[in-house]
Image (spheres, grey):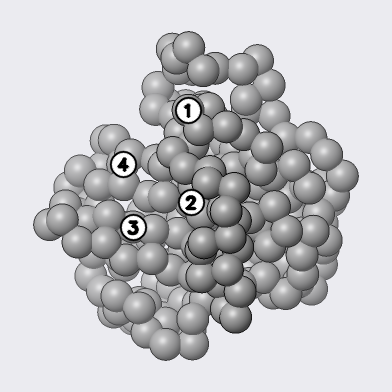
Amino acid sequence: MLIFMMVNLVFLNSCFKEDADELNGDQSPMGEVGVTVSSSSMEIAGASNIEAVVTNLKDGISTYSASATITNPVLKNLVANFPGVEVNGDVVSITNMKIQQTKEGIKSMSGNNMGVLVKYDSKVGDTYPIEGSSNVRTVVSKTGVDDYPYGFYLIKTIQVEQTNIGLKSSGITKYTYIANHKFGMVGVKVDFDDGTSVTFPIYTGAEN
């Protein structure tokens, strides 16, 4: 599930920067062909067997193939509406997901809500425009302290929030992208309209 959120996952704001929708910096090793991305081996909120692999890298844009087993009807309904996603029973898959990853950050290049997901040097309050929308992603946390559990480590994170405007009927109200300058995207938190939430960890087979 979280793999699809990374993909889908214009505005008037005093924090806007002219280059807020551009991603610069050297190519990240995390975007190289053959690099794998996965989540916890345990089922989380009705999602399991979450994995993706980079199948192509051209002009700085990585193409991923991804799949997951999803039994949660809210999550399944959400990803079923993403462009390019195929659903076969409880198995969902996509073969042409495009992401730009540099040592500066991560940007979604296909699907709904294209735009920068995170820039590691951003400050709290900075925003990134979402293509084709008046909505933005907003940096809500950057503690600079090793306090986020990641495998056997505690790491520093930057957290970027995206309110689910326009899709209230999906049952999801907000996404929070959790990232680290060395390990890239390390988690996606999903807030549901019943007040509950769940965080999907993300592990990538390479690092900056």
- For the N terminus, the image quarter is bottom left
Query: Label 3 sits on what residue type?
Result: Val
Look at the numbered discs 3 and 4 and tell me whether their residues touch, using CB distance below 8 Å.
no
* Percent coordinates x, y for residue 161 in the rendering: 41, 42
Residue 131 visible in the displayed image: no
Query: Label 1 sits on what residue type?
Result: Gly
Image position of 154 with respect to 24: above or below: below
Residue that badge 1 annotates: 125
Q: Residue at x 83, y 39 (%)?
A: 25
Residue furthest to the left in view is 194
Q: Along the line of sight, which residue is nearer the eye, 136 or 207?
A: 207
Query: Label 2 sits on what residue type?
Result: Tyr
Residue that badge 3 annotates: 190
Q: Earlier in the sequence, mark 1 or mark 2?
A: 1
* Camera-nearest label, 3 or 4: 3
Cα distance in 3D space between marks 3 and 4 = 10 Å
Residue 24 visible in the displayed image: yes
Q: Along the line of sight, which residue is nearer the eye, 99 or 139?
A: 139
Q: Earlier in the sequence, mark 2 or mark 3?
A: 2
Look at the numbered discs 1 and 4 and tell me whether their residues touch, using CB distance below 8 Å.
no
* Camera-nearest label, 4 or 2: 2
Cα distance in 3D space between marks 1 and 4 = 18 Å
Cα distance in 3D space between marks 1 and 3 = 20 Å
Mark 4 residue element = loop
Mark 2 residue element = strand
Q: Residue at x 45, y 14 (%)?
A: 13
Residue that badge 4 annotates: 164
Query: Which image quadrant is residue 108 in?
Result: top right
* Percent coordinates x, y for residue 97 in the rendering: 61, 56
Report the side of 27 relative to 5 (left or right): right
Residue that badge 2 annotates: 177
